[in-house]
Amino acid sequence: MSNLSNFYISQIEDRFVPYWLKFIDKEYGGILNCITNDGERLISNDKFSWSQGRWLYILSLLLEMKDVFSSINYSQIEEAAEKTASFLTKYSYNEAYHVTFKSNQKGMWLKDERGEYFSSIYADCFVAIGLSEYSKVTNNKAYSAIALKITNSILKRIDDGKYNTEPYPIPDGYSSHGIYMILTNLLEVTSSMLEAFNLDSASLREKQMWCVDTILSKHLDNNRLLIREYVSSSFNDNLLLDRHINPGHTLEDMWFMIECFEHNCILNQKLSLICEITKAVTALGWDKEYGGLLRFVDIDGGRPKGIDNKSDYENLISSTWDMKLWWPHSEMLYLYRKLYVLTKDKTFENYYEMAFDYSFSTFPSTNNGEWVQIRDRKGEPIDKVVALPVKDPFHIMRDFLKIIKLEEK
């Protein structure tokens, strides 16, 4: 355990923090992360609110874990966090607490390709997550009030069905697993913030459980124990949308659910189901020929099949199904280790070793401290935009920091 913790501490101290400190916007705040996939070149100074909120969350975790790291320059971390929080509160939302999709370096809002300013509810979620964690670690109630107002705005828009999900709109008539999934995590972070200030979190915790229950009742295929990414009332097993599975989303969501169940003191009732879903989607999504987790798979395995109605999201499924992306692999590392600690089931120890061997032999850059995040099926780097035209400062460090916390316990 000590060796495992030290390994991830070294990854954070020696590789990831030094890399990302180079891209801090010292003048205006936030991070400049429109970076090529190889991590070598900044291609734009535009700022996606999605990424800025994620960056603030990572900085906040680093501040929270200050005693763990001996060689991080915390004056830089503290300054970067405060300037990022200040940038977000000045420029990222309107009077209704709707978060803009992107801005220029100085914070001037920019329209997306469809001519919209407020084009993704996911941006709102990540800004609220970042501000919530930062307010908790700094004991700053001003930021917590803003985070709560953004969260309440998110919940109202989702309840009313009045929200967008760029870069991939949800096709008409479908329910998206991703919405309930991100809410599960958002409400965990926001509720924990309220509890740190001894404020009432009951309504948010209740909504969080509703999100998890909705996933398990509406999106879970009970026969296969697989979570369907999209479902509709007129389910059609001949359609690509209805048949495809997103293994990475499922694995990430499993630890979201674990945290939810832990805080509601019902994990012992739900852990077996979490384990079975994890095993089922790992068996389905792991590439037995080249290793690594496939981005999308058919519910019966392999390339997603079915009638393609040519929506943006369906085009994404068809064109990127066999790619190997960084974020599911870092999520796997944390989930498998967490499940092994909880259950002592050797299957999860084996899964962890499998994911570790593939991830650290495939993704780390030989030229800088980051990972080359986007790879083809054989693990070769490819120059392709996935979701946003950015290099992401979030998933890897979040999962490594959570593994360190797990081992330190």
Image (tube, rainbow, N blue to C red):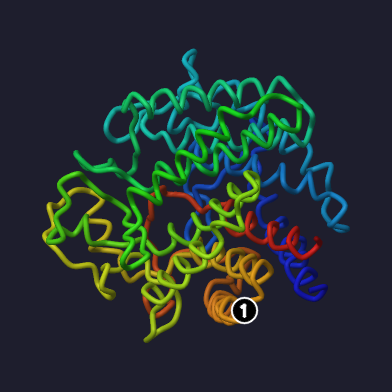
Percent from the top left, x then y, of residue 104?
49, 31
Q: Is residue 286 left or right of residue 233?
A: right
Q: Residue at x 11, y 60 (%)?
A: 307
The secondary structure type at the circle numbered 1 is helix
What residue do we see at 72% from left, 66% from top?
11
Horizontally, is 5 left or right of 290 in the view?
A: right
Residue highlighted by disc 1 = 349
Considering the image in quadrants, where does the C terminus appear?
Answer: bottom right
Mark 1 is on which residue type? Answer: Glu
Occupied quadrant, residue 349: bottom right
Quadrant of res 17? bottom right
- The residue lying toward the viewer, choosing from 171 and 10, is 171
Q: Residues within 10 Å of mark 1 (few under 14, many from 20)?
A: some
Q: Nearer the viewer, residue 87 or 228?
A: 228
In the rendered view of the protein, which quadrant contains the N terminus?
bottom right
The percent position of residue 308, horizontal first and vertical second, equals: 13, 57
Name above or below for residue 193 compared with residue 295. above
Query: Of residues 19 and 183, which is closer to you in this image?
Result: 183
Q: Which residue is farthest top?
A: 95
Please determine whether, in this image, residue 157 is positioned above or below residue 371.
above
Residue at 56% x, 64% y: name it.
330
Number of marks in picture = 1
Report the front residue among 409 and 33. Answer: 409
Q: Is residue 262 left or right of residue 197?
A: left
Residue 22, image x and y in percent? Answer: 67, 51
Q: In the image, is residue 273 above or below residue 171?
A: below
